[in-house]
Image (cartoon, rainbow, N blue to C red):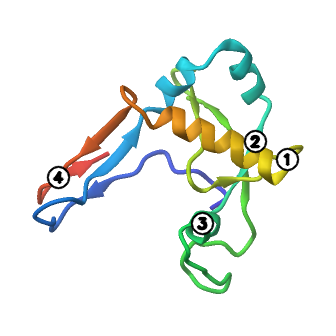
Amino acid sequence: MPLASKAAMLYALVTPPEGGETEFADMRAAWEALNKATQAQLEKLSAYHSLYYSQEQAGFIHKTDQVYGFHDKGATLRPIIKTHPETGRKSIYTGRHAHDIPGMSKEESKALLDKLMEDACRPPRLYKHAWTPGDLVV
């Protein structure tokens, strides 16, 4: 998608008797935990974002002509660091969809993006939601 969403909402209609939790990482806290040199490096970088990329990493292959992924114009290049338009606070803007940082090899890109995710997705920056029917998470 060429535009990033402002928010996402997840609503549980039916939940399994066990398992099925969803984890959320506080990417603003992950940004604030980085040293100043790393922050300065990341502010200059962008990465491509593609649903197809993350799905391929999980073993699924989607064709461009399928509606799934809305991907008829290629992957979107987005800054790795996003600044909130109202608060001015920064956060890391990557995820499993992010790949290929211009100016870096595929291996360098993957290593940097994996490290950012690994660091972001650890306590105390991680929240795990155990769903019950009727839950809404924004």
Quarter placement of the N terminus: bottom right
Asked which secondary structure carries label 2, the reply is strand
- As rendered, which of 55 and 59 lies closer to the eye? 59
Q: CA distance from mark 3 to mark 1?
A: 20 Å
| Left or right: 65 as drawn, with respect to 31 | right
| Left or right: 118 as drawn, with respect to 130 | right
Three-letter amino acid code at disc 2? Ser
Depth-wise, is mark 3 or mark 4 nearer the camera?
3
Residue, disc 4: 135
Residue, disc 2: 46
The label shown at residue 57 is 3
Q: CA distance from mark 3 to mark 2?
A: 20 Å
Instruction: Tell me what residue is drawn at x 27 percent, y 47 percent.
Output: 137
Depth-wise, is mark 1 or mark 4 nearer the camera?
1
Three-letter amino acid code at disc 4? Asp
Which corner quadrant of the image does residue 34 belong to?
top right
The label shown at residue 123 is none
Three-letter amino acid code at disc 1? Pro
Residue, disc 1: 102
For marks 3 and 4, the one nearer the N-term is 3
For marks 3 and 2, the one nearer the N-term is 2
Residue 23 image offset from top left, x and y in percent: 34, 46
